[in-house]
Image (spheres, coloured by chain):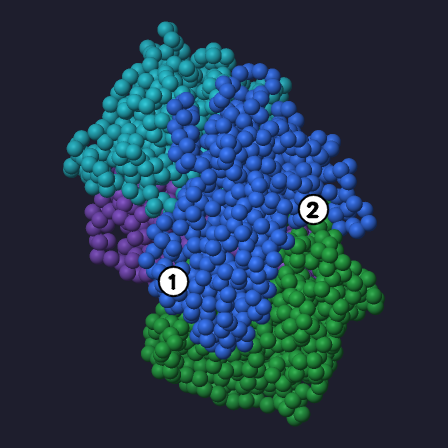
Chain colours: A blue, B cyan, C purple, D green
């Protein structure tokens, strides 16, 4: 229960695709692979889910399954069973930023064009969506939803003008789209028998490719799965979804790249460049909070980066204390990193009640007043009479951590020092992350001057922006224990820190 | 339980609209009027329902509510309550001919255009839908559903080209649409603060206008509601919905007419003509089966026409028998007409179990074998030892009436003469009615030669096409008892009898 | 929509049982026969339903399925499928008089006793339930529900004292129960492999036995089903349920009789007598309103009795008018009887909207004010300018018929004469019928003096108690047209008319 | 995901009660306190939940709310709102051992007796239930469920014989019950305005009392809540539920004690003794696995005991390795204890996907073959190339840990040493815990001889029974680091270790 979780800050979407390799019809349960893949991306969106499958023949039969809520609720088993005979498909899990999370806005979006149906799943937010909507509508197209996904689909259908030719050039249309909008999108476009996996030139949202190997080979220590053992290809917002379906990490889709995935394998078709001089701008908060700790970005494991943030925080903000602990569960790697770096013992101080969920609270009851604390039990023996360093991954509004501090103090902690493993958020995101309004962010409010007093902590310290960037970019091996890290990013690496610094990777009025 | 009901023959849709009169915001519960209006049109479609309301200001706020199943299930009360502050709206109830009755295809369809949002509800089926879809897609528009309603909406947005002007000319766009497709449609188009009610030039589907009067005036015998008492205007596929919401019948929308309905009242904007020489082609089966008996078309009550069909049938097919009865409930007016004309006593022979519904039947059980008969109880005392004339409104496949005849005979009827109050259906409909394939229609099968033997009846006779047309067109007063009616239709009256005669009102490959 | 329906007057329960004949395990789908049997009794209770089946071996396996709402909703298909391997069973459909219609009170009630499990289903209401509850509790038994069915079950277990013998004498226990409570109950008691069908000595509630014949024999005119063709035995509150499952009416259970139903057939075990001089007291309202018209009681069809009530009413209350009509649907036989007797033509004046159902009505809306009239459409052509006799089966509170009269007058009826085919209800029922409180009954209120004025009718007349009794007891053949009937009941026939006369068949404080 | 969780080993029930203090009607939201209390006991039973409340006046009005599934699903908000005006109540959450988890078996059980209604909630399993059922039934009582709770309720009603006196002596009846059955039960009995909290003489199941204090006092460091601030009393299977509702731990109910809880406070009424020489027999698995780590039993925190088990395990089974880790989440305290004692670094090696839940798996798919591993992500960086000590809390069947070991090895662990923080389970439990059959328990199977080879581990070692007992009984302070602990239990302390040793606290055929 980090402040992120309570604050409603969240990723908007996860995308997932699968193509069965080899001869079709396949024995692979594609619809089920999609479902399990989405379950593993569930942390990226819990409001609705959808999958679209294709049998891959020409003209193809597409089947669509969409529902509200978690993936496991959204797809009734009997409907999933009906989707058995498919050879490829894409899926999407969604968190709505706008509150309009109707089934209608649910992705993937399928439209019928002169050349047949395409399906689109999208993670991100087009910075110039408003201008693009006007452009499409000026052409005489009505838009039936507010989703960027429909907009992208209509843009793909629109330019260049559709002609009744034999071979529609979807790749040209995708490139055209990429020239019309710089960021942010990781896209899956399915057409008949291929999936195009597309990442915007700034690489703002993640996208990884994996290879499905036979389960028998998966855990075997003797035989190694070779290329010939490939049962299919998958593409996912995060590599964490690969293990749960028996896939092996293959590589990331590069910023600006269009990758074609078919039963014949993976083919890189094109890389659309950024403007001269622009660095990539992968969202740094994927590392800090959004991604699952076992995902791999840019060659490093997210858990390790978070642990490194904790170490860096211990260097920047050392504390005279008895124990180090975490606000479970997302801050745990950082807390362990802090403990390792500082030499203080790591203990658990809170135990989470995993059933709390959606308890119905009547207005004005004592239970409402108990606040977030009712979600935790205090493990008193571990901290009574002690000075506690409590590592959290953020303080967004400041009203989540406050009752936890009270709880610890009441249960006997003599001091509670809050150490935050990321810098204060100060600016809005226009690239797919739901962030409270500027006024709600504690870092922009007068209370921030005495943040410790405001939340009732003995002391409060944040990780610096430079510290975060070097924890991400430095890589664990190159940082020596105790050494103050340098802040120079290396080579062609770059990250979007706009919500911390206000420096956006592109002009907002594109 | 007529053969129509069992056979799945059915109307595709009902449309309903309401605009509050006088000053806005209105006290009228527009969303609830829409809901009750749709409930009264439920017989025209039971698979899904939807309403879209507008607050009527510029730019407007639209609210959409859609759901599967009957109207009362489709709209949760708490969602209806949220729609309280609206001043106008349109609704739709749908029966899917294609089996794809997903929420996505559910009407009304709303799209955002350069000039804001329009909402469209449609009853009918565009005879040239395939050509129009191709045209729209060639322009670069992707179509996300298979519904004519989305197609109509995109056609309205497309031509003439959208310009960023102050006053979009929707009426010109509607006229343009009417020139692109001759039939069949009764349309409601809502834009900000007006509803355009449109009927195709052939008048194939019905559309009537009503006036909401204060409830206090409604049943009063002393005070009569005047124009000043108008609380709002409603427009509906059938006038039967007026009474249930406290509205008075005003008039029909004419074939080809565009009527603007606003808070200021009713205004006829235009009448798009038919090609020279073409008669109107109002669907004759609205009289025979689809419409509710208390609806009014062309100045006459549907019940009365059905009764007249029964009388005409008694003239064309007299029977030596003891009693006349009905297959409840839709054939009852015809049976009463037959009894009146023939002088035979009318009795009830079957009682319907209204709870039968969706009983779960295991494969191969005795209950399946019992067939439709399990829906009826035999009122033995009324017919045992007697010769029965059983009037039904149709024999479509012939497998519904057969077990009923067996039931009556087994319970003691000495003879069972089937008299059908409409001619045999032989041809498909391309204008909005779901009819079994040609091969399934009993009138096209070899068994038809000995239909009485096939279904186990003592004799079978149908109403003639001429008899049906004259029952509809003649009007009750002009037909003398016992007189063979003439078959000349009068003046500018015309009806579509394509499913009976194969003569379609327009070229099918338009 | 009679006043009965609107007023909430209703039967409390229906019971149904089935035993497969011949060798076990049976091929008969017993659980499905039970379900369909209950569907046909649905008019006797719509709030919950339950079935209990037994495999019939010793010790038996019982399976229970219960649910809220209509039978078709209460039993999920997948649960029904699990009950396939059973050889006998009993079921119950329930309407709660008390409002506590929880699943817990749902019947049949199963309890484990020293001699194994028994299951009980009950229709009726024990007149001395309170005293019996005290008796059972004084013995140290706790009662977990308020239902008579649990009480009966515990009484059966209690006396005589249970001993660990081989052969428990359930028949002696049932007789003992019948001596403890005189009425009202029709009971089904299932134990291992038999069902005991029991009717109280006054025969207050109905109970009939039927024989399941092969479907192939059912409608055959050539072969007649013989005893050897018996596939099973069924027992039901009403014979109307027999046809829907392919069963033939066999006979009624007699007042006071205990019938044993097993795979070997039907066996009458005992008849518990009434006190010297007491007549039977079959509820006369089963004829008037509760039963389905195709059910048979005491050798006559309910429909025919209702028609006779209409004829009798025409004799007692003739009217100067133009047409006779009905408030659909329950009053139709009486209306047809009135028309036949009076010679006036029968027409339909109202058409019912069968979809109205549970429309959500916001407080204070126009739709609420429209009242019951929104459920009907006026068939104006049939009565405009005419004097109408409107036959209804009752006026309970007087607030249902009133808006219908207004509707007819407003639509052009010049006079509306209400003729009620039953006498006014004035007294409560303590034997299983839910009747409004004395104060709510219009016949006990001051308005009753000018009932015509109160409801807006031109005139109002009721059937006399004597007329009702003779219509029921006389039998149709013995009544000559126009003759004033005598009021002497014949032989051993007797009916409970307590709600009309206040004369109850037993002392209430038994 | 410990083997316990996967294996289905589980507590059967949790009970919770609340009485508002001071003047009634109370302002305290008793129904909501009950709900939240049950949510905090959700780990003790997830299949159904129920609450019964009383207004506390004489005669009382009881309200019952029961439902299947988790507490938050079982109680619809609108139903909870209806229960607002109550002053006391009891609740229950249930896990069915028998598979018959119907609503009917759902507790609390309410029965009507000669002296009014009592409600009973029960945690435990009566060792002599079969004999008691026979006894009750011999008295002529039918039992409608298979639950011990109904049996207890009928026993309370039965003896001594009920008389119509003014003051029923429930305490005498409870004592009588306690003499009829020695164990295992923690009971709540509600009657009108009091709750009797009862624990069996062996104290086999836990039961604790708490005091509700004003929320304003709860977190205040300045003001301390005094007796006068008591808002109510709560009683719960575990003290972990106190914090979530704003209650303070007060004390445990003692073995054999009957405590009366009323608005006037807590009163100990009686202590029913054990047979001479018998020790208490609190279930040792409450410490090992069932209880939430923040609960307090016998004066010590469960978390601390588990940590101590880990330390003891490190003494008994030291390992040459690089890192210590846990199978999240239940084994974490033991793993941290092992790490502390051994001096090896603690790291996380697995990350749990909290959304996996009820994914629908088609038969024979690859996803099924992936097994439990799909629920975890490997945090490779933390263990690749290292020797891992993996601490789990049990190995029940051995099929859960196996794929985890494979996963770690495949991801690069060079050695995986399994250390189990409890002894092998070998015997069934007859006192309320659901344990697999003897044959399924890995410790009773031939594979157990080479358990390491069977599950693919480098080595496997269990905690000894003596080690577990001393970790539980010794208390942390008295154990010196590295010292071999003595196995003598102190004074009047005793625990049930029957499932480990086969030594049951009472004769099973009581």
**Same chain for the residues under marks 1 and 2 in the image:** yes
Depth check, front residue: B489 or A389:
A389
Horizontal side of residue D68 vs B343, given as left or right? right
Quarter of the image for the C terminus of chain A: give it: top left
Q: Would you name the residue on which mark 1 appears? A: A451
Question: Label 2 marks which chain's residue?
Answer: A
- Say which of marks 1 and 2 sits in front: 1
Residue lying at 49% horizontally and 52% vertically, measured from the top left: A466
Q: What numbered label is drawn on residue A307?
A: none
Q: Residues within 10 Å of mark 2 (few under 14, many from 20)?
A: many
SS of the residue at dot 2?
Answer: loop
Identify the image quadrant of residue A345: bottom right
Q: Would you name the residue on which mark 2 appears? A: A246
Residue lying at 54% horizontally and 57% vertically, measured from the top left: A484
Percent coordinates x, y for residue C458 in the rendering: 22, 42
Percent coordinates x, y for residue B59 in the rendering: 29, 33
Instruction: Tell me, yes or no, if residue C118 can be seen here.
Output: no
Q: Residue furthest bottom?
A: D276
Residue lying at 63% horizontally and 85% vertically, measured from the top left: D478
| Relative to C176, residue A504 above or below | above
| Relative to D59, residue A507 above or below | above
Percent coordinates x, y for residue A371 in the rendering: 41, 64
């Amino acid at each position: 229960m980090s402040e992120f979780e309570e604050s409603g800050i969240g990723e908007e979407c996860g995308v997932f695709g699968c193509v069965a390799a080899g001869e079709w019809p396949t024995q692979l349960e594609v619809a089920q692979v999609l479902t399990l893949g989405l379950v593993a991306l569930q942390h990226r969106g819990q409001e609705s889910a959808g999958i679209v499958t294709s049998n891959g023949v020409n003209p193809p039969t597409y089947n669509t399954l969409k529902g509200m809520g978690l993936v496991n609720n959204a797809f009734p088993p009997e409907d999933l069973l009906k989707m058995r005979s498919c050879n490829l498909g894409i899926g999407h899990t969604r968190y709505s930023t706008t509150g309009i999370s109707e089934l209608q806005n649910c992705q993937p979006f399928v439209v019928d064009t002169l050349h047949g149906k395409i399906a689109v799943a999208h993670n991100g937010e087009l910075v110039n969506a408003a201008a693009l909507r006007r452009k499409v509508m000026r052409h005489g197209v009505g838009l039936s939803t507010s989703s960027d996904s429909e907009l992208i689909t209509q843009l793909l259908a629109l330019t260049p003008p559709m002609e009744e030719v034999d071979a529609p050039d979807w790749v040209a249309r995708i490139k055209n789209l990429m020239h019309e909008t710089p960021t942010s999108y990781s896209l899956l476009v399915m057409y008949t028998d291929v999936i195009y996996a597309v990442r915007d030139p700034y690489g703002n949202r993640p996208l990884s490719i994996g290879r499905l190997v036979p389960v028998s080979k998966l855990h075997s220590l003797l035989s190694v799965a070779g290329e010939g053992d490939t049962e299919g290809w998958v593409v996912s917002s995060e590599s964490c979804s690969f293990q749960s379906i028996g896939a092996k990490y293959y590589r990331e889709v590069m910023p600006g790249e269009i990758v074609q995935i078919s039963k014949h394998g993976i083919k890189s078709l094109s890389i659309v460049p950024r403007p001269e001089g622009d660095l990539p701008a992968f969202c740094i908060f994927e590392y800090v909070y959004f991604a699952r700790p076992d995902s791999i970005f840019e060659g490093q494991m997210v858990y390790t980066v978070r642990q490194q943030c904790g170490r860096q925080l211990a260097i920047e903000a050392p504390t005279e204390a008895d124990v180090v602990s975490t606000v479970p569960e997302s801050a745990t790697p950082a807390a362990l990193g802090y403990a390792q770096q500082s030499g203080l013992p790591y203990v658990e101080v809170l135990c989470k009640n995993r059933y709390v969920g959606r308890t119905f609270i009547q207005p004005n009851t004592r239970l409402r007043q108990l606040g977030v604390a009712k979600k935790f039990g205090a493990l008193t023996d571990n901290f009574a009479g002690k000075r506690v360093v409590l590592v959290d991954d953020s303080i967004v509004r400041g009203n989540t951590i406050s009752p936890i501090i009270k709880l610890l103090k009441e249960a006997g902690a003599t001091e509670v020092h809050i150490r935050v493993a990321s810098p204060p958020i100060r600016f809005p995101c226009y690239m797919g992350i739901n962030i409270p309004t500027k006024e709600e962010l504690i870092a922009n409010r007068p209370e921030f001057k005495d943040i410790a007093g405001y939340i009732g902590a003995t002391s409060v310290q944040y990780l610096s922006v430079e510290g975060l960037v070097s924890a991400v970019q430095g890589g664990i091996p190159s940082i020596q224990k105790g050494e103050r890290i340098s802040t120079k990013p290396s080579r062609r690496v770059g990250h979007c820190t706009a919500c911390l610094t206000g420096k956006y990777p592109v002009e907002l009025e594109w």
